[in-house]
Amino acid sequence: MKIKELAVYVDGKFYPKSQAKISVFDHGLLYGDGVFEGIRAYDGLVFKLIEHVERLYRSAKMIMLTIPIEEDKMEQIVLQTLRKNNLRESYIRLIVTRGVGDLGLNPKKCPKPTIICITDTLSLMEGKEENGITAMISWVRRNPVDATSHEIKSLNYLNSILAKIEANIAGSDEAICLDKSGFVCEGVGENIFIINGDLELVTPPTCTGALEGITAKAAREIAKKLGHKVTVRNITPFELFTAKEIFLTGTAAEIAPVVKINGRLIFGGRPGPVTKNLMKEFKKLVRDPREGISIYK
Ligand code: PMP
């Protein structure tokens, strides 16, 4: 029996996965000139779809990329692609590139952005949720806010990829980047939180160059509801190494406990109770119809 290939949306049409292609002259490929979102659907609900699409348009605004369709049409593209693939659980990649130009980097030569929507699956934490992950501070500093910082969710992820390579070499699951002053910034594709002795959650501000994470915002809200104090401020490596608990947040990673950092055990090398509780509540939240948009909308 022939297995039906996943349908991928490219500029108004659906193509089977193996035939979904862009031009070699697309500046998304040539220069990483474009923006994207990683979004997730749980049980037929696209979690925080409106927030993700809003962030996509903010990233586009920053790089002066005019997306030729309205935000609600972009939301519909996501929902339509999921329906087309009959996917109720999915990791979604929504991409807008500068489009086709010449070999020079001038975006003026790219008249039409390319819009792509891939609905697939991705599991970062498979099997690691229970026991947590290991992490290390990498030598790669986060690009500062006066450079191409990760506040822009752009197609240029070399900053993160270099850090991830260091983690791979060191045999660590994840890498943590510091900002240029030496404060803790974020993971390669996740925001970071520590929990200190007063059961207070602390997370770095975006002025360290971190992305304003949608999962991080949800985690902060859950924590407040559970009665924790949540503070956004700079975190030193000392505070990270001596934290009671550490966790990362991201669309792909969800809430991921960090149990070892640069060789130092956190909560004795296992996920701590506060993180576990947040993970439990987050699992409920993503399936709450008030938090997402139904694929049948
Ligand atoms: N930081 C970076 C650099 C990321 O790429 C991501 C993943 N999109 C995050 C943080 C987490 O953001 P979110 O929770 O919105 O997925």
Image (tube, helix red, strand yellow):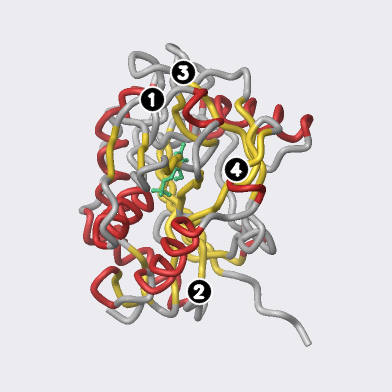
State how far apart marks 3 and 2 are (Cα): 38 Å
Residue 82 in the image, given as x and y percentages of width and height: 45, 72
Mark before the other along the chain sequence, 4 or 1 = 1
Residue at mark 1 = 209
Q: Nearer the viewer, mark 4 or mark 3?
A: 4
Left or right: 106, with 175 as reference point: left
The residue located at (46%, 49%) in the rendering is 249
Decide which of 24, 116 is in the foreground and name it: 116
**Which residue is denoted by mark 4 in the rendering?**
266
Please say if 191 is above or below 151: below
**Mark 4 C-beta to ligand 1 under 8 Å:** no
Look at the numbered discs 3 and 1 and tell me whether their residues touch, using CB distance below 8 Å: no
Q: Earlier in the sequence, mark 4 or mark 2?
A: 2
Question: Please, what secondary structure does the residue beneath circle 3 have?
Answer: loop
Quarter of the image where ligand 1 sits: top left
Q: Amino acid at mark 2?
A: Glu
Residue at 37 percent across and 48 percent down: it is: 199
Please tell me in which quadrant of the rendered image residue 109 appears: top left
Give the answer, above or below, for where 234 lies relative to 41: above
Marks 4,2: beta carbons within 8 A: no
Q: Which mark is residue 89?
A: 2
Helix, strand or loop at label 2? It is loop
Label 3 and label 1: CA atoms lie apart by 24 Å
Query: Looking at mark 3, is its residue's CB closer than 8 Å to ligand 1?
Result: no
